[in-house]
Image: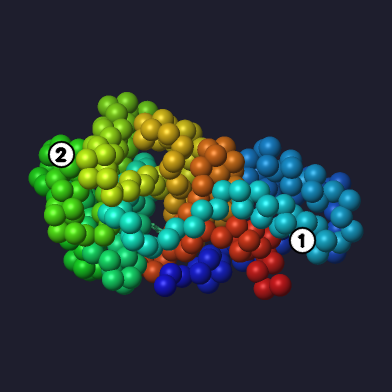
Amino acid sequence: MWGSLRSSISFVTDGIFSRISGFKALGCSADILAELEEELIRADFGPSVAKEIVEVAKNTVSRDDALARISNYIEKELSLYEKRFDMSCENGLRVIIFAGVNGAGKTTTIGKLGASFVRYGKKVRFIAADTFRAAAVSQLEVWAERVGANMTSAGISADPSSLVFEGIQSAVNLKEDVVLIDTAGRLPNKNSLMDELGKIVRVAEKQRDKYGDIFVEKMLVLDSSTGQHASVQAEKFKSSMGGDDISIIMTKLDGSAKGGTVLRIARESGLPICLVGTGEGVSDFAQFDATEFSKLLCGMDNK
Ligand SMILES: Nc1nc2c(ncn2[C@@H]2O[C@H](COP(=O)(O)OP(=O)(O)OP(=O)(O)O)[C@@H](O)[C@H]2O)c(=O)[nH]1
């Protein structure tokens, strides 16, 4: 259904470790370990994860030995945060809210997921709750038309929470399967916008309380090239969206040389990762898979 990580992420298939001079022949001398730590920090693992990985690489006897142990370590850590995204809508209406900073990839992700749900035979509605930018609404409309989703939108400056209320009502009335809500990009330091996001979540959850068989999910869309700021974003979005039941979608992994950011964000936020974006096309995303991802990071994908 979707692309695979392996076919989409060429940056990591080289493996960050192949960039470490001498790693190939020498195993892990002190110099190489120092170089490894630098490379890990450059790849955005963050200082503490970098140190842990260097510990794992110590006293290994060969490059292959080191890579295997590092890969196992990263896999074990990442698997704690791996969450399957399933396409079923058996129990009622799925309402999925997408939040994140400007340009993180929310609308594009909604388009891709909408297309998948439609391909699964589901009736899909998009809600354009980004009522700040006319361009954002038309971008979503283009996706809706392209994938065959219904659409709830209003003029600029409409109240996004009212629109969410209206859109869910329409979905209930028309017995649709899934509602994907595109919220405006917002910086976490803009308190009024973060409060507005909280209100959108509460409105959706109230509908659930009213109808019973509505399941509200919260997705935080993060651009993987954001690096350390992504963890700060995750904290703020967590508190404004209310609670820990948020999943992360990491976008733009295809354009990032910093695959380490995935483990760092998962560890720092404590939030699970369900999907990754690997390009701008409709099928350019994949289920997050800890085993495959750790192998790609270590350049072991062909082994
Ligand atoms: N290479 C690549 N580009 C992506 C990916 N996801 C989104 N993009 C691109 O990133 C840009 C921003 O994506 P949008 O989906 O508009 O982002 P947004 O979060 O909705 O943006 P706002 O509405 O401004 O908040 C677009 O040019 C997308 O095509 C991805 O996984 N890989």
Q: Earlier in the sequence, mark 2 or mark 1?
A: 1
Residue 79 visible in the current orientation: yes
Q: Residue at x 55, y 39 (%)?
A: 270
Q: Residue at x 68, y 37 (%)?
A: 48
Residue 228 visible in the current orientation: no
Q: Residue furthest top?
A: 191
Q: Identify which residue, 297 or 112, lies in the foreground.
A: 112
The image position of residue 169, as x and y in percent, is: 15, 48
Q: Secondary structure at mark 2?
A: helix
Residue 196 in which image quadrant: top left
The residue type indicated by label 2 comes to Ser
The image position of residue 43, as x and y in percent, is: 62, 49
Q: Would you call the spot at circle 2 few (<14 residues within 10 Å), some (14-19), or many (20 or more)? A: some
**On screen, residue 299 above or below 271:** below
Q: Is mark 2 within 8 Å of ligand 1?
A: no
Q: Which residue is mark 1?
A: 68
- Looking at the rendering, the quadrant in which ligand 1 lies is bottom left
Q: Which residue is mark 2?
A: 162
The image position of residue 93, as x and y in percent, is: 27, 54
Q: Is mark 1 within 8 Å of ligand 1?
A: no
Q: Residue furthest left?
A: 155
Q: Quadrant of the C terminus?
A: bottom right
The residue type indicated by label 1 comes to Ala
